[in-house]
Amino acid sequence: MANNQVSREFLFRRMHSLLGVIPVTLFLFIHLFTNSSATLGESAFNERVEFLETLPFLPFIEFFFIFLPLLYHGVYGMYVAYTSGYNAGKYSWGRNVFFVLQRTTGVFTFIFVIWHLWTTRFSGNTPNFDMVTQVVDSPFGYWFMIIGTVAAVFHLANGLWGFFIHWGITVGPRAQRVSAYAMMGLFLVLSAVGVAALNAFYAAV
Amino acid sequence: MSQKEIHLIIERQDHTDSAAYTQEFKIPYRPNMNVIACLMEIQRNPTDKDGKGTSPVCWESNCLEEVCGACMMVINGKPRQACSALIDQLEQPIRLKPARTFPVVRDLVIDRSRMFKALQKVKAWVPIDGTYDLGPGPRMAERDRQWAYELSKCFTCGACVEACPNVNERTKFIGPFAISQVRLFNTHPTGEMHKEDRLESLMGEGGIHECGNSQNCVQVCPKGIPLTTSIAAMNGAVNRHAIASWLKR
Ligand code: SF4
Ligand code: FES
């Protein structure tokens, strides 16, 4: 490459895009799927969690497959949100509104994830059904979990729409429109899955 | 009832770095006027709406038929060509502002140099100079010519640059039009011989990675250029080039 210094920025951006999907999106799929076992009752959920805890190399997977990519995507994403301009007030076309929403849900999800890790993974409690019911026990905890989940899932679905463009997969306007509808469908489905799981914990409070 | 008037509210500025101010004008209505005709009327009789004398409003225009790009300004909140903005189709009062993404020279005149620098950076031309006759180049397939012709309609007006949220003080983004021009010249059979240079310039500072898909560009382009399609196509090309050239090292 002609100019190594400036190509770095390009690589950082592409890495941000790639890591957002592999593994962060994949992880969130697994995470939401695991949570939804809460709708089958306390013991079903606890069995799932125990199974995950028996995975070999768990600390290694957690650190390299989840923590590092999430940290990179989050921190670099803050920089992206900062350098972006916001003119949806002037130009309120749908895609421009989604452009703003992508960045606001990103910043919100970043804060949410820190709180979420602090109240679960790093709370010192054993990760099980009871731990989650304690979190959703307060109105703040419940609503923060609901809004955080919906924001994260929106960022995921709309982020995939952008990913398909950044990687030159959806090129023409029709393909991009179809992908937009499909991703909004995904957003609704994943939101429902996430909220249903949270309500299952809440019902057991 | 031929005493109709046109009400204009214009954002003005006397020098490159003096403060902006607004001035209102009322000019007599004639059928089939466009925004340029109104500005010409003000030039002929430079008095504001209260009849006070003032300096005529400056603007740029050449072709008056939407082919030169010079007259782009913000009309009722949207960047567009003043020569194709017909008074009968505009809501009054008509608000005119310079496109402030660019440095303002005076009134509605802006300095588009950044766009020409961007075109230089991405090498938006077909190099044909040699020390001897290079002969005719390869022919272009008709199927490609048809869509490439659409891209060649870009007249560097800057509407897409003005509307793009990611062209701002915090980025060095070259703007949507330059990416589309890379696609045009990389499709040209002779231009294609330098396609790697252009792709590498798109991976450089302020390149294609600064695009955040707000897609405002495609909404405002007066020539209907499929900018978002060009950007997605170039995203693919740039990624393939990056991976391929890394594997070859
Ligand atoms: S791409 Fe369209 S909006 Fe952008 S400079 Fe060219 S003609 Fe103007
Ligand atoms: S004067 Fe040439 S485009 Fe308007």
Image (cartoon, grey):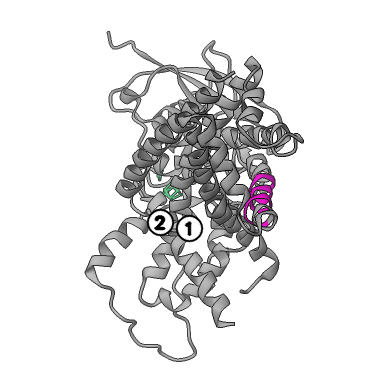
The amino acid sitting under disc 1 is Ile
- Which region shows up in magenta? A64-75
Q: Label 2, on which residue?
A: B230
Point out the residue furthest to the right here. A124
Locate residue B205, reporting x and y percent: 64, 59
Task: Report the residue at 40% width, 89% height from top.
Answer: B133
Asked if badges 2 and 1 are on one and the same chain, I answer yes
Q: Label 1, on which residue?
A: B179
CB atoms of marks 2 and 1 within 8 Å = yes
How far is mark 2 from mark 1, CA to CA? 7 Å
Foreground: A74 or A135? A135
The amino acid sitting under disc 2 is Ser
Foreground: B210 or B50? B210
Q: Is residue A205 above or below residue A37?
A: above
> Which corner quadrant of the figure contains ligand 2?
top left
| Residue density around tag 2, few if under 14, some if 14–19, many if 20 or more, within 10 Å | many
Prevailing secondary structure of the magenta residues:
helix
| Residue density around tag 1, few if under 14, some if 14–19, many if 20 or more, within 10 Å | many
- Can you say which quadrant of the picture contains the N terminus of chain A? bottom right
Is any part of residue B151 visible from this angle? yes
Foreground: B135 or A45? A45
Q: Is residue A74 magenta?
A: yes
Task: Report the residue at 39% width, 77% height from top.
Answer: B190
**Earlier sequence position, callout 2 versus callout 1:** 1
Q: Secondary structure at mark 1?
A: helix
Locate residue A130, reporting x and y percent: 64, 28
What chain does mark 2 sit on? B
Is any part of residue B214 visible from this angle? no
- Can you say which quadrant of the picture contains the C terminus of chain A? top right
Locate residue A10, reporting x and y percent: 61, 60
